[in-house]
Image: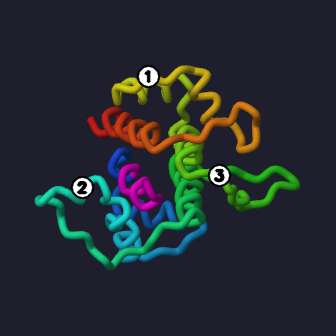
Amino acid sequence: MDNNDLLIRLRYALDIKNKDMVEIFKLGGVELSKEEVLKVLTKTPESDEEDDDSIWAEPVNEDYIKADDHLFESFLNGLIIFKRGRQEPKPGQPEIPALTNERSNNLLLKKVKIALQLNSEDVLEIWDLAGVTVTRGELGALLRKVGHKNYKECGDRYARNFLKGLAIKYRK
């Protein structure tokens, strides 16, 4: 899954409105208009690979903005501020957190966990709602820093099911 697809699914799962999306991007340090946000939330040809054989697939809009890692991480940082409020930086800390070079799926898990104030049990419950069993050890490996000996990359299946579980939990 690419970053655009992750944003589309996260927006759906948390039922975020367009004006809130603009505000979240702004809180993350990226100025986007409502029209630009809609272009980011458009399915890209690469993200629609699994539906290529379907004759009922919707035509893909070529007018889109590709969400790079910087834009995606800025959105997630803005989501944390949007949900929890701005935190005063401690002395010696930068006001805006430095961007990481981490894989998008792992970053999604970490930042959404922070934004929604979820503990490990909540995250495991969300996967359980989607029908996926993840152990505490696997979750710990997914939440580790890159370079740690027990770090594990979060695959698309885990990310997709995490977002599916979020949708089940938050779109009642």
Spatial CA span between label 2 and label 1: 26 Å
Magenta span has 5? yes
Q: Secondary structure at mark 3?
A: loop
* Amino acid type of the residue that numbered disc 2 sits on in the rendered structure: Asp
* Amino acid type of the residue that numbered disc 1 sits on in the rendered structure: Thr
Residue 133 is tagged as 1
Residue shown at the point (37%, 75%) measured from the top left: 64
Look at the magenta stretch and give its main secondary structure: helix
Spatial CA span between label 1 and label 3: 24 Å
User: What span is in magenta?
Assistant: 1-10
* Amino acid type of the residue that numbered disc 3 sits on in the rendered structure: Glu
Residue shown at the point (40%, 42%) measured from the top left: 160
Whether 94 is drawn above or below 168: the answer is below
Residue shown at the point (39%, 57%) measured from the top left: 5
Whether 148 is drawn above or below 80: the answer is above
Spatial CA span between label 2 and label 3: 28 Å
Residue 102 is tagged as 3
Whether 31 is drawn above or below 127: the answer is below
Residue 21 vs residue 110, the one in the foreground: 110
Q: Are dots 1 and 3 in contact, CB under 8 Å?
A: no
To which residue does mark 2 refer? 51
Q: Earlier in the sequence, mark 2 or mark 3?
A: 2
Residue shown at the point (19%, 69%) measured from the top left: 59
Splitting the image into 4 quarters, where does residue 168 fall? top left
Density class for disc 3 (Cα within 10 Å; few <14, some 14-19, many ≥20) is some
